[in-house]
């Protein structure tokens, strides 16, 4: 049978908007400092997920999961793709854009991809770079959509904001972007960071870059409307990982992994929905494949489509997510596996004897440098720097009572039962997902 678009029916397009290092810092998620009217509008027109989590709080590894529907320890993309890091998918992996292309879709990436190898995708349009030039990105997207001429498309918009750029956030004047500055003395500093002058200055820059990103999202929504495709297109907005600060990005704490997800579907009958389902970035690929009616890969995916629960506030059976971190940069090795339930988080740090490593941009940040000068007794939010750098083999937190994850309950007799239960779940999940690091457990007879 000919595909829907060839039979004259409306195409079922997909646009994925990915922020780079944005936490829950939008108006729709209750942030009083953020100025994000376009994301807030998207939330009013779609579904905002309150409990969405990446699987690894690191740019490249997280994106590999988004595009494959597999944990990075399964797909082989354990860390960064670029330069000397050079990590990539296993040869058998067929990412979603390739599967959609096989189903008759036109596919394009604009901005940042950060996943290897490029040959696994087969893009019709490959326009990496210029990911902070949000107006230029929108214009490229418009040309791509117009050139699709009624054929369904998958468009991957990889924004560069609010990622750091060296020691700053690349905040300057950009074409057709209104520069919105924030007063460091008035910004809201997250509780997991020190509220000193260095951090305040950087947080103000972060909010400015986040506003630039938001303007880009607005431009993209306008492009879809102008080209007549807004009501034919599933639009999803997410971030790859949390804000680029210690305790967040590269960490398995919620500040690094609890992220925005907003979905706008033309098939929705209810708007402005808020979902409490616990969802994971492994669920994105199955969602896109179901929307497109496209065939999945020969191997099983590890997530499930969100479409059946898109308009359910509290769907049953969506109460836990798993995560897996191994590398950020190639020199940043700190493998962790774990589970997040509605109340608890369990982390297994496979090599606790290692000092927790820093992404180069985080190490160079004014925030971290201010703490280094103060020594290991200095406080990173409520956590001492020494405690941040030197971690236990197991971490267990009651998120409800301790949202900043400061009180490790792994040694608590009162929580021994919960520790054993979550440890067992993670061990089983690692086996099911073919985690190569399981060999360490076999050596130890676990």
Image: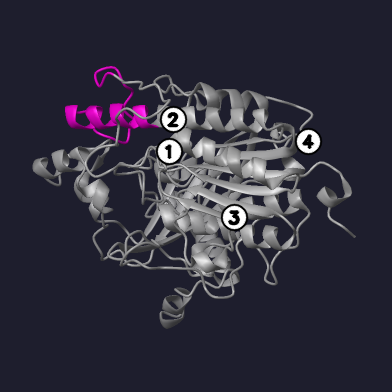
Horizontal side, residue 390 vs residue 343: left or right: left
Mark 1 vs mark 3: which is more N-terminal?
1
Q: Which mark is residue 282?
A: 3
The image shows residue 248 at horizontal and vertical percentages of: 36, 43
Can residue 265 be seen here?
Answer: yes
- Color scheme of the displayed model: one colour
Distance, label 2 to label 3, CA atoms, is 22 Å
The residue at 49%/32% (across/down) is 216
Label 2 or label 4, whichever lies nearer to me, is: 4
The residue at 36%/30% (across/down) is 174
Residue receiving disc 1? 22
Mark 2 vs mark 3: which is more N-terminal?
2
Distance, label 4 to label 3, CA atoms, is 22 Å
Q: Is residue 182 above or below residue 166?
A: above
CB within 8 Å, label 4 to label 3: no
Mark 4 vs mark 1: which is more N-terminal?
1
Q: Secondary structure at mark 2?
A: loop
Classify mark 2: residues with Cα within 10 Å, few (<14), some (14-19) or many (20+): many
The magenta-colored residue range is 183-209
Distance, label 1 to label 3, CA atoms, is 18 Å
Can residue 46 be seen here?
Answer: no
Label 1 or label 3, whichever lies nearer to me, is: 1
């Amino acid at each position: 049978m000919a595909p829907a678009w060839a039979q004259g029916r409306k195409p079922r397009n997909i646009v994925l908007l990915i922020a780079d290092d944005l936490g829950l810092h939008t108006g729709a998620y209750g942030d009083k400092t953020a100025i994000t009217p376009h994301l807030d509008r998207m939330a009013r027109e779609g579904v905002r997920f309150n409990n969405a989590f990446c699987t690894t709080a690191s740019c490249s590894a997280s994106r590999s999961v988004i595009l494959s529907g597999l944990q990075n320890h399964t797909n082989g993309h354990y860390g960064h793709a670029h330069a000397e890091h050079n990590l990539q998918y296993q040869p058998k992996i067929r990412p979603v854009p390739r599967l959609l292309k096989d189903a008759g879709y036109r596919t394009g990436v604009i901005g940042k991809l950060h996943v290897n190898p490029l040959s696994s995708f087969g893009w019709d349009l490959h326009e990496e770079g210029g990911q902070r030039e949000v107006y230029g990105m929108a214009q490229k997207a418009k040309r791509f959509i117009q050139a699709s001429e009624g054929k369904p498309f998958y468009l991957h918009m990889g924004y560069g904001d609010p990622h750091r750029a060296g020691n700053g956030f690349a905040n300057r004047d950009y074409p057709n972007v209104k520069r919105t500055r924030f007063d460091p003395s008035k910004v809201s500093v997250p509780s997991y960071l020190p509220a000193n002058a260095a951090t305040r200055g950087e947080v103000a820059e972060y909010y400015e870059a986040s506003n630039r990103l938001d303007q880009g999202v607005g431009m993209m929504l306008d492009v879809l409307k102008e080209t007549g495709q807004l009501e034919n297109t599933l639009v999803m907005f997410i971030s790859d990982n949390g804000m680029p600060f210690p305790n967040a990005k590269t960490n398995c704490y919620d500040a690094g992994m609890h992220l925005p997800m907003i979905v706008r579907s033309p098939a929705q009958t209810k708007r402005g929905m808020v979902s409490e389902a616990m969802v994971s970035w492994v669920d994105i690929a199955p969602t896109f494949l179901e929307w497109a009616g496209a065939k999945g890969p020969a191997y099983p995916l590890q997530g499930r489509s969100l479409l059946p629960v898109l308009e359910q506030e509290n769907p049953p059976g969506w109460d836990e997510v798993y995560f897996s971190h191994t590398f950020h940069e190639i020199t940043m090795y700190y493998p962790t596996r774990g589970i997040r339930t509605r109340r608890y988080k369990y982390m297994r740090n496979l090599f606790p004897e290692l000092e927790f490593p820093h992404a180069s941009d985080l190490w160079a940040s004014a925030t971290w440098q201010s703490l280094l000068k103060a020594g290991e007794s200095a406080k990173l939010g409520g956590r001492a720097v020494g405690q941040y750098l030197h971690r236990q083999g197991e971490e267990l937190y009651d998120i409800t009572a301790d949202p900043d994850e400061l009180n490790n309950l792994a040694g608590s007799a009162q929580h021994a039962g919960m520790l054993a239960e979550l440890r067992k779940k993670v061990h089983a999940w690692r086996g099911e997902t073919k985690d190569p690091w399981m060999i360490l457990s076999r050596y130890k007879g676990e």
